[in-house]
Amino acid sequence: MLIRDAHLADGRVRDVRVRDGRIVTVGRNLQQNDSSVVEADGNLLLPGVVDVHVHFREPGFSHKETWTTGSRCAAAGGVTTVVDQPNTDPATTTGAAFDEKAELARESLVDYGINGGVTPEWDPETLFERPLFALGEVFLADSTGDMGIDADLFADALERARDAGVPVTVHAEDADLFSADARERDDHDAWSAFRTAEAEIAAVERACGVAEDTGTTVHVAHTSTPEAVDVAAEAEMTCEVTPHHLFLSRDDYDDLGTFGRMNPPLRSEQRRAALFERLADGTVDMVATDHAPHTRAEKDASIWDAPSGVPGVETSLPLLLEAARRGDLSYERVRDATARNPAEVFGLSQKGRVAEGYDADLVLVDPEASQKIRGADLHSNCEWTPFEGMAGVFPLWTMVRGELVYERTEGGERFGEAVGRNVRE
Ligand SMILES: NC(=O)N[C@@H](CC(=O)O)C(=O)O
Ligand SMILES: [Zn+2]
Ligand SMILES: [Zn+2]
């Protein structure tokens, strides 16, 4: 296959030849001896997004999402690799639970990793025998699934992961620093007042410290404050930020209500802007979505009863491309934060670049084709988005190892087959 006349993120215009699922040549005016030619027409060709943080909810919560619906969201959003988190039912804390999830993941349209979780009941022996993507997210405080663990178990888990050569990702919040005063309130912003910025910053400091003492590193999931990003960078650990912490703030509770509840919570507009700055200047290693769907009926509760989490895997690249279109972020930063860096940090040597020898995980976009995000147009089982009405630049098509998994057509759109594979196998 020859993809002709593609604009790359660095401004070069190139043809890309794909054979057996791999990029074999990136060059100019390549000879057309290929069985099929895809005209890129000068549109922007990016490496498919590697999203190291999604919750596709199977087994256990298929009314919220399934591997089919979740991976359709991914494909339609330009995401070609996803990493699923362990707070399913059963939680992915044993070899048997991993196997059960691995069977379901075969329905995925996009490539995937499966993380292992840590609880007092976990079985590290059988878990580490499996092709884990990483250990994590290791919950240092309770979130959806109530998998929060204590300091001793965390240190033990870090040592075992280090010895097994498996990366670790952490959900860093310290419940001892949550605000008791905020519990007295019942407005929506109370959630942000309760799970304080200090609770995150202190937990990131502690997690990095334990990692240093253990002679290893951690990757900090969903850092929501600029301070936490700086702590991780200073300690030479890596971190990810989510689209909701980049594009939404406490000012949005008026519109979002309990649908804006997630962990860690939305922060002040000032912190949001500072977090975005750190993405633009490269201090933030990567964007990951923490795609955490819950149904409308579940979210439609009091701020203390609604479940935490928002969907995001389908709208992440579109929101970032819109920011790039407006000049708030370079296309190279979008490329690096969504694909190159996550692939490098997690050792996916075949992923994350439009270059010879890499998997043909590719996404084509018309960078000027900005449109309004509508929950009704998205593909999650949860049927809503916290980004309703905001602008996004959506893919024209998405390819996984040379196979079209998503394509916009004249009348609508078309999905491909469940070609996804475990990236650690
Ligand atoms: N982020 C959230 O608010 N919720 C996540 C769990 C998590 O990532 O903490 C979920 O699984 O619902
Ligand atoms: Zn989390
Ligand atoms: Zn999560």
Image (tube, grey):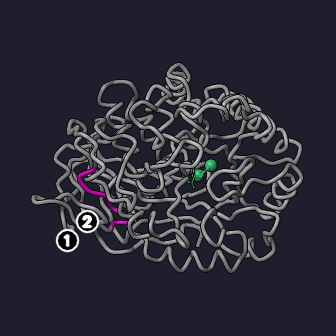
Examine the rendered structure and indicate whether residue 371 appears above or below residue 352.
Answer: above
Q: Which residue lies furthest to the left in this view?
A: 410
Residues 111 and 35: in front is 111
Image coordinates of residue 261 in percent, x first then y, are: 53, 42
Q: Mark 2 is on which residue type?
A: Met
Specify the segment rendered in magenta.
Answer: 395-402
Contact check, label 2 and label 1, Cβ < 8 Å: yes
Identify the disc placed on residue 1.
Answer: 2
Image coordinates of residue 73 in percent, x first then y, are: 37, 58
Q: Is mark 2 on a helix, strand or loop?
A: loop
Q: Mark 1 is on which residue type?
A: Ser
Is residue 396 in the magenta section?
yes
Image coordinates of residue 230 in percent, x first then y, are: 67, 27
Identify the disc placed on residue 35.
Answer: 1
Residues 233 and 376: in front is 376
Q: Gap between marks 2 and 1, in whole Å?
A: 6 Å
- Please tell me which residue is depicted at 58% across the width and 73% down the height of the picture: 425
Pointer 2 or 1: first along the chain: 2
Query: Does the numbered disc 1 mark a residue whose Cβ is under 8 Å from ligand 3?
Result: no
- Please tell me which residue is depicted at 47% across the width and 45% down the height of the picture: 338
What's the magenta bit mostly, secondary-structure-wise?
Answer: strand
